[in-house]
Image (cartoon, helix red, strand yellow):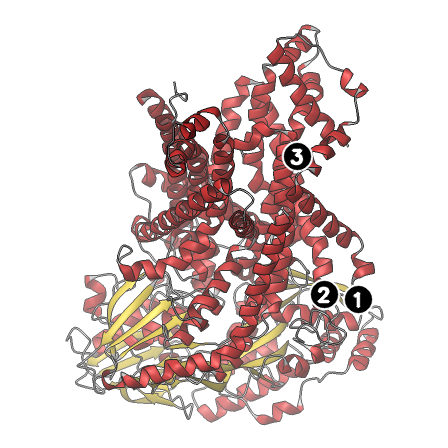
Amino acid sequence: MKKSLLIMLILVLTLSFTMTACSSGSQTNNQQAQTGETEKAQEVPQEVTYVSMTDAVGLSPILTNDSASSNVIREIYETLFMRDPKTGEIKPLLAESYENPDDNTWIIKLKQNIKFQDGTPFTSEAVKYTFEKIMDPKTASPRASLLKSVSSIETPDDYTVVIHTKEPYGIMLTALAHDNLSIVNPKADQNGDINKNPVGAGTGPYKFVEWVPGDHITLEKNPDYWQGAPKLDKVTFKVVPEMATAVSMLETGEADFLVGVPPEQLDRLKNNPDIDVIEMQGNPTRYLGFNFEKKPFDNLKVRQAISYAINRDAYIATLNGLGYKSRGIIGPKLFGYNEEIEQHGYDYDPEKAKQLLAEAGYPNGFKTTLTVGNTDVYMKMAPFIQAQLKEIGIDVELNVMDWASFLSYCKAGNQELCLNGWMNVTGDGEELLYPQFHSSNIGASNYSRYNKPDMDAMIMKTRVTVDQNQRYNYIREANIALTDDVAWIPMFNDVVTLAHRKNVKGITFESNGEFRLNDAYKE
Amino acid sequence: MPLSTQGYRISEAKMMTETGEITIRTDEKYRRKSPFVDLWKHLKRNKLAVTGLAIVTVFIIVAIFAPVLAPYDPYKQDLTIRLLPPGSPGHLLGTDEYGRDMLSRLIYGARLSLLVGFSSVGFGLAFGVILGLLAGYYSTLDSIIMRIVDILLAFPGVLLALAIVSALGPGIANVIIAVGVWSIPTISRVVRGTVLYIKEMDYIAAAKALGETDFMILFKEILPNCVSSIVVYATMRLATAILSAATLSFLGLGAQPPAAEWGAMASTGRNYIFQAPYLTLLPGFAIILVVFGFNSLGDGLRDALDPNLKNAL
Amino acid sequence: MTGYIVKRLLQLIPVLIGVSIVVFLMIYLIPGDAAEVIAGPTATAEEITNIRIKLGLDQPAYVQYFRYMSGVVRGDLGYSFQTGQAVSEAIATRYVNTFGLALFSALIAVIIGVTAGIISAVKQNSWFDHICMSISILGISAPTFWIGLLLIIIFCVELKILPISGLSGQLWTWDGMKHMILPAITLGFNSSAMIARMTRSSVLEIIHQDYIMTARAKGLSEFIVIMKHAFKNALIPIITVIGIDFGSLLGGAVVVESVFAINGIGRLMVQSINARDFPMVQGTVLVVATTFVLINLMVDIIYAAIDPRISYK
């Protein structure tokens, strides 16, 4: 029977050799695949498959608030305004122009001759219908707060919308560029459930075909698209929950593109001659957050000490180029960022950290817990922070929980330290300041329980000021104040990635990790 | 080693019923050779079981002496030497994504993985044995307990563990509870079956006739006779428990970082499967080896202690 | 027999009620609720409250439970909190996939397991025997996700002979089978190993018995002897393994479903519990539990059909 053990060992060894051989053998295999592909390049079917780790929750912009849903919604529906992916400026999309006769009135002219996918003309009535539905508490829209300041909507004619606000709403345009304020076809919404079956529901370049929940969503070209029919005939959004599987599918050509390559897989994809990886400094930011209601994190010196204790550069070096540093709370890709913030913040200096900790009255450190949601990006960061804080005598216990528990735990303010991130949809600094640091959001998105009246006042200014230059300065000032106060410790900003088969061209990729397929095609 | 004594006793009981003798407790067994020697004699003939025993013993020794054997602190990070391949000078099996020594982590991993295995099986036994004894002995309780066991059995094990870990949070202790609960229904079934069998034995009737209380009969007469089947089952279950912990890690609910638990290591290592395959391969092999050890030891024990169990397990 | 089946079916009712209560308590006790998940991290308190009211989560727990159960009694499994999809519809599509996967992998497990087991037994202690038994031990000793990923890398990425994603199009077409083969092997590996071991030992036991000797003496070919006599007797343990595994396959396929991107019921269950989607969790668990009980009943009935010595009252 010793033989069987021997054989087992041989099997195991063979397996591991195959694995090592894999890394060296892949090059040739891939080349073969490539030549194979050029042969049949004559008539490439214009179909692409995108792989995502999670399925969409719904396909109605009114009822969803997650990126997997938004990725699909963006192809079916359109917003009144959009942020230019290159310049970051807000420009009209379904809208033609706008004017502000006063701070509380927005007159928006709409483009004419645009049709929903079922042929219904797009008019001001659809805008009014969509927005009023979102504002109705019975709808329970998860992004109702985007229109919280709106008091009424009028439609003097088919192509004019007048939005009245209760107080000046300086971020109206950024809000109107938000995917969740995409305009819905009232007829489609009344005739069926567009959250599941959005047939003819939008004005976008692709039409809904089918959704097999948990498996895939299929869209097809909208031949009557007002900006000209897209080149792709068919787009499939396929759910693949395991990243290693998704990457393998991209390599074998079963998938055409994916977003968010993990650092560990980056080199392999980059070395694959069939695959291109687009890397771009992005706006998502990852941070170590404090609970200001728990001692000793109400103490500025303790927060500074922790900031001095963490060697961000060393951590970023492990990300294989998929993270970059910024010292401020509001990162370089957001409206309101100014380079001067890089003079603020605190760099790695463990001696200074220990000294500050002693000054704060904790010469021997203290014990605390770090609450982490079990997502790869945070799970990887947690042991690093734990090890770093141990160096200055802070004994950190990790408190890992699943995502739903994490949300509930942090909203209730039970955590001491936590790891979290913020992805800005509109690209405007206000969209970070208000949810994260305004006292009215304590118990909701303000996990830090940051509650300072002067900061509240400053944040309100960034919301109500209609003049964009003034707003810029307010956000800038708030950024400096929060960074100096160590409101949270920015760990790194994401470098967003999109990996695609080389024969897929023309995908528009934005710094918030979103993509658009209007101009995409396959060679 | 009281375990083997009991194994001995059950075969004796059978022998006696076959010959139709009426026996009251048999003290004569103590006059014979030590039952441990007897078990060893059985086991020794089975080469696979001996291999299994050897593997398990080695791992237990590694677990106990981990601090002596491990060349480095398994939690000491050094980001300047990340992902060194196996065979690098100073790091025989390479380093992981934080620059921690893989060999040291695998050695300490033996501790945690065996801890998860033993404690969760212990947890399952504590509840499963009592439920099984009660159900087997009292026919009034039988149907109620068995319905509860049915519910637990019909309930998808993964979900149960998932719910427990979601409720209590991930972490070694909660993983132990989750995996332990998972084994309660099967353990109680095994025990109940054995009790039903033993209950009919003449010496139990005799003990009743002598006026022993139910409690005494359950714990002094019946339980010892169930031990052999429990031991066999528990050994096999250890293997499953270690695998279950790995599955929980895959679902993101296993041991918390930075714990060096094999399942967690294999699971987080899978992200590096292209870049540094040994990060997931090595802990995977460790699991295979120790699970192989427990399984073959369990097979051997079954053959040696209680051949009748063969079809029940 | 009919009486027995009816009795077993009636027993299903308390089990399902028990299961539903456990699920409810579970969802109720674990932190977080569906409204918070739907609203996401950006949500304001007001947004969460509105969603909670819409879903009825503002009602007391017992009201929620009875409201849900009164629907179930009428055959209405409710609507998903998260997607608004009818639970019965969501389950139906996934159930077919997982059932197909389980069936396919059971089939593979039986073919491989029985063949390997019989040959191993006949050629006891040959190289074939050793290799088979070694692979089977490997099969029950390795974490599923680990085996799955290795298979993907070897067969799909490097050798490029099989597609990665499980399930595309019709299961019973060649294309469908090609997609199904790796996940089915990954899932069935464990069972085939068990079946091989069981078959081998049952055949070994029987092969030396008198009537087989007689059959041989009569000059029947070795093949016929084995197939006719030995295999028939090996059926019972094989069916037991299939019964046990098939039940757990349905609930436990979550790992294979994740690794191979199969849209199955195990994944649905895990996703729903992560989203605190109570109607979906309740629905999937009830369906899985029912299947489990029914399959066990079927196994018992098959026992009686194969082995006339077994009868049910």
Which one is in front, A82 or A173? A82
User: At label 3, which amino acid type do we have?
Assistant: Val
**Quarter of the image holding residue A415?**
bottom right
What residue is drawn where x is 49% and y is 27%?
Answer: C209
Residue under circle 2?
B103
Residue under circle 3?
B231
Q: Residues within 10 Å of mark 3 (few under 14, many from 20)?
A: some
What residue is drawn where x is 22% and y is 83%?
Answer: A43
The vertical placement of C6 against B59, above or below, is above
Under circle 3, the secondary element is helix
Alpha carbon of mark 3 to alpha carbon of mark 1: how far? 35 Å
**Sequence order check, earlier mark of 3 and 1:** 1
Which one is in front, A301 or B211? B211
**Quarter of the image holding residue A328?**
bottom right
Q: Position of residue B15 (x, y in %)?
A: 64, 16
Q: Residue furthest left?
A: A119
What residue is drawn where x is 56% and y is 23%?
Answer: B135
Which mark, by number, is residue B71?
1
User: At label 2, which amino acid type do we have?
Assistant: Leu
